[in-house]
Image (tube, rainbow, N blue to C red):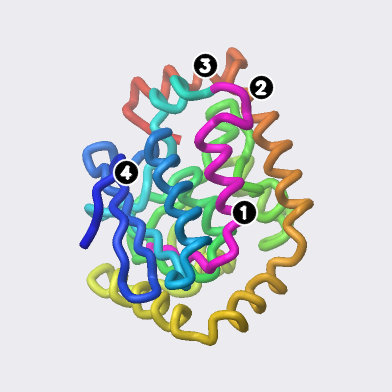
Amino acid sequence: MAEDMSDVLISRDGGVMVLTLARPHKKNALTGAMYETLIAAFRIAQQDEEVGVLLLRGSSGVFTAGNDIGDFIATAQSPQTMPAYRFVEALARLDKPLVAAIEGPAIGIGTTLLLHCALAFAAPNAQFKMPFVDLGLVPEAGASALLPQRIGMVRAAELLLLGESFSAQRALDLGLINAIIPVQALENHAARQAAALAAKPRNAMLAALRLMRGDRTPLLAIIRDEAEAFAAALQSSEAQKAFRSFMGKGAQP
């Protein structure tokens, strides 16, 4: 049975903790309260030996439109206390594999969190975008380092600096997702793959993931540097102008 907490539904399916972003009237745009719920869920999953894998998905045909700008501005404080920063730090520290199922828009954090997933699957209609520079901001979630490492500097610059949308096929070609799955089969496919991971010998699976990820200390330092630059950029006139423009259009970062 699912539990409704701050527009995030949390349920269990065997050894899989399922996290569903459920704020459809705002295209699942993330609020500080939603980040807090996800952070708490990560903490529970870390401590619960019955949980082997986390599965993150959206609802109503949308993964997430990114941060809710109005809420984000209202909760923006020092970098270390911002819910969004503490979420990406928790994401980087998560020892158990995260699986993502992406349908529709995956904006901002909806794209950068893929860099922390063990497996990610997208519907053909998925659209990815990292519009940080357009908002007068900088990348987050370690994307400034992880994306060039994953796809090379030239392609990373294209995605992070130009900030244009790209398709599920492009995400697959770049190695950001594992497969493109028909919309009607996406959730079941992601759930089956998450269950398959959860059924593996637990210690061996977690050790293999830890070895693949390597020492996370440098990554956490980069995330901290990004957060400080992000917080400073929030106060800039160009960011304030971009926010007013985006809010006027009803868009989210």
Above-or-below relation of 127 to 131:
below
Q: Is residue 225 left or right of residue 84?
A: right
Distance CA(mark 3)–CA(mark 4): 23 Å
Image spot of residue 29 (x, y percent): 36, 39
Residue with the mark numbered 1: 92
Distance CA(mark 1)–CA(mark 2): 22 Å
Crowding near pointer 1: few (<14 within 10 Å), some, many (20+)? many
Above-or-below relation of 88 to 79:
below
Crowding near pointer 3: few (<14 within 10 Å), some, many (20+)? some
Q: Residue at x 57, y 59 (%)?
A: 94
Q: Amino acid at mark 4?
A: Asn
Circle on res. 8 = none
Distance CA(mark 1)–CA(mark 3): 29 Å
Image spot of residue 235 (x, y percent): 60, 16
Residue with the mark numbered 4: 28
Residue with the mark numbered 2: 232
Residue lying at the far top in this picture: please name it: 237
Residue with the mark numbered 3: 240
Q: Amino acid at mark 1?
A: Ala
In this view, the mark in front (3 or 4): 4
Magenta segment range? 77-101
